[in-house]
Amino acid sequence: MEIRRQSEQLERLYLSPYACFSDSSRGRLFPDKECAVRTVFQRDRDRIIHSKSFRRLKYKTQVFIIPEGDHFRTRLTHTLEVAQIARTIARALRLNEDLTEAIALGHDLGHTPFGHAGEAALNSIIGETGFKHNLQSLRVVDILEGGRGLNLTHEVRDGILNHTGQVQPLTLEGRIVKIADRIAYINHDIDDAIRGGVLTMEQLPAACLDVLGWQHRERINTMVTDLIKTGLSCPGKISMSEPIQQATDELRSFMFRHVYIGSEAKLEENKAVNLIRALYNYFLNNQADLPVEHRLRVGETGVKLVIADYIAGMTDRYAIAMFKKLFVPQGFPVV
């Protein structure tokens, strides 16, 4: 018997009836021969991990643009923290851990250089169609990665698309990732803001910390165990209890007021936005300078979206290097 089929049978024996089973996937965009060893969701996870888009997350901003310290989060470390939190919850609730991990690892593949500042810049440029990183993440896995996409399963694609926004993912595994994303960024952004001198512990809302915990690990543990307890007492429900949810929402609102909007962590964002705009306008007027794989898609996709795809795929340091190459005078070579 194939190892994959054994794994599928084990899922049926062990996982909750509310889980999304690998052998019941709605399938892929295009027919694909099954793997003898891995389930479809394990295969999706591996495709994401081995993609160039995943590796580039290492040099993309989380909150602090090009931080000098080695311990600030990047988009990659954020993704790994989301995956860890989501897997813990999925395992405790006997949901599909492989599906959960695949969604978590892929949820931010479409993020731009310079984090949400880059996203806002492209959104303002594109116009009517707009630019959202969750939509771009889906474009990456469907079309852009490797020039033909990763051909992921419907369930992973749905979780990536709906990890943010008002629409809930179809699977409980996707809903876990949506909440795990928030748990991760609220807590690690507090950690980074304190490390960067933007916040002090004394400024954090004491009423929230009395409920959630005064230490980083305590807060994550409180949120995660509360989600698990709620899920165990109300099977099929992925949510926090009212007191924990309220404290979490208040802490998130505090972070928006004191870190995400107008803080010292955002001092370089105007420069980042101007850089994105300059690159966009340059390639709009010099389409021949786009990489050939992007130029070939202009007729089918339209030049605006093609340029947005190219810029969104850049890392912070690549975007800066490109800007210097195009707009900063270079020294004259001495023979």
Image: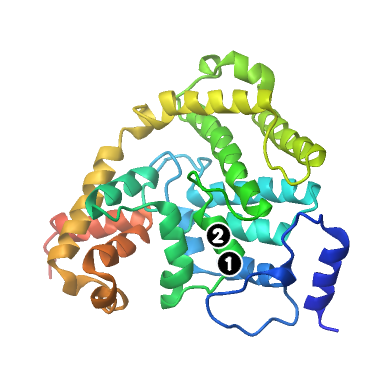
Residue type at the position of mark 1 = His
Quadrant (top left/top right/bottom left/bottom right) for the N terminus = bottom right
* Residue 158 circle label: 2
Horizontal side of 286 relative to 100 (left or right) equals: left
Residue at image location 56% in from the left, 48% down from the top: 168
**Rendered view: 262 above or below 151:** above
Tell me whether the residue at label 2 lies in contact with that at label 1, contact meaning CB atoms closer than 8 angstroms. Answer: yes
Task: Report crowding for label 1: few under 14, some 14 to 19, many 20 or more residues within 10 A (C-alpha).
Answer: some
Is 140 in front, or is 71? 140
Q: Position of residue 69 (x, y in %)?
A: 47, 39
Horizontal side of 74 relative to 266 (left or right) equals: right
User: Would you say residue 213 is visible in this rendering?
Assistant: no
Quadrant in which residue 42 is drawn: bottom right
Is 157 in front, or is 63? 157
Q: Position of residue 183 (x, y in %)?
A: 60, 37
Quadrant (top left/top right/bottom left/bottom right) for the C terminus = bottom left
Task: Report crowding for label 2: few under 14, some 14 to 19, many 20 or more residues within 10 A (C-alpha).
Answer: some
Residue at image location 16% in from the left, 63% down from the top: 284
Q: Position of residue 86 (x, y in %)?
A: 67, 48
**Rendered view: 149 above or below 119:** below
Residue type at the position of mark 2 = Asp
